Image: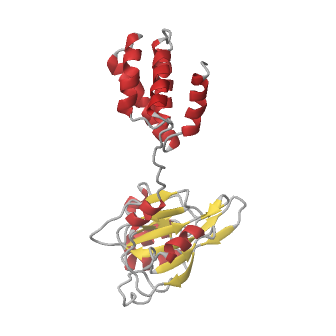
Amino acid sequence: MTAPDPTGWTLPTTLPATLVDAALAYGAAGVPVFPCAPGAKVPLTKHGFHDATTDPGRIRSWWSWMPEANIALRTGTTVDVVDVDVHGVGTGFPVLRTLHRDRLIDGWGMAVRSPSGGVHLYYPSAPDRPQMSWSRGAALVDFRGTGGYILAPPSTITGPDGTTAGYEVIARGRRPRPVDADTLRDILTPTPPAPQREFQSVADEARITERLSGWVARLPDGNRNAGLFWAACRLAEAALSEDETTAALEPAAASTGLEVPELRATIHSAYRTITRNNGGPAAPSFRRTTAGLEAGR
């Protein structure tokens, strides 16, 4: 192992070929390591990354017991990693190029090609600003910080077909510095569209809510909660607030014998369901519903 990079980057600038010596090199550089199953990412220790250590005696003992064990680095204490995935469903490289263009991922100290063809960008952790791990599957970009780990060179992965591919260092950075993972996470988190009222006018809104309210008031015993839930979902999809929907439907639901705490819980559940399932209002569904109501169905 050579001396640490003069810029302050702590990872070794060269790595021995054997797994045990590479694990010792990471540990000597201050990066806690632990063993994973040969050819896989499954921890071999009872507590996974919580068992990671820089102690050379413990490291030698682990790799003496399992010489072919992969090397996992615990992230969030010395190094953080931006993980750009490549899968059969897509690639994170278009997002990576955009982040690079906007200078949001500058400062990496080491770039590693993963067995899938993706890339891991290693950054020094900010000692005074721990950053939690997160995943953004739609963007195929993950972050490994506090609470995470990453397999490191010269570890290998064995695929379903029996072929083996390794992690390989492909570039070194010049001026490593921490990455702003919180900003990356916020940029890669989709923002639901702003709700749009589906009613063309106040009169239109009043007419539809009145019809839904009347329908709720006529619900038979045994179908009252389900019917109220359905009506509340329709108004939630049309971007009425929960308070507005409660004001519109509560009197009708109460007239059927539903208790106020129960019916309000049903309306609240409808709003949670619409928000969770749609990430925002589902206007087309409501347009179909209002068309039926207008036709008297």
Q: Residue at x 48, y 24 (%)?
A: 207
Q: How is the image coloured?
A: secondary structure
Task: Give percent across and percent down for residue 260.
Answer: 33, 18
In the displayed structure, would residue 145 be above or below residue 31? above
Q: Residue at x 46, y 44 (%)?
A: 195
Q: Residue at x 44, y 83 (%)?
A: 12
Q: Residue furthest right?
A: 161
Q: Residue 143, located in which quarter of the rendered image?
A: bottom left
Q: Residue furthest left?
A: 128
In the displayed structure, would residue 27 be above or below residue 207? below
State which quarter of the image contains the N terminus: bottom left
Task: Give percent across and percent down for residue 189.
Answer: 46, 57
Task: Give percent across and percent down for residue 74.
Answer: 41, 66
Residue 20 can be seen in this image: no
Q: Which residue occupies the foreground of this view, 157 or 186? A: 186
Total tally of numbered discs in the picture: 0
Q: Which residue occupies the foreground of this view, 9 or 231? A: 231
Q: Which residue occupies the foreground of this view, 127 or 56? A: 127
Residue 244 can be seen in this image: yes
Q: Residue 296, located in which quarter of the rendered image?
A: top right
State which quarter of the image contains the C terminus: top right
Q: Residue 181, located in which quarter of the rendered image?
A: bottom left
Q: Residue at x 50, y 76 (%)?
A: 100
Q: Which residue occupies the foreground of this view, 111 or 235? A: 235
Task: Give percent across and percent down for residue 28.
Answer: 38, 79
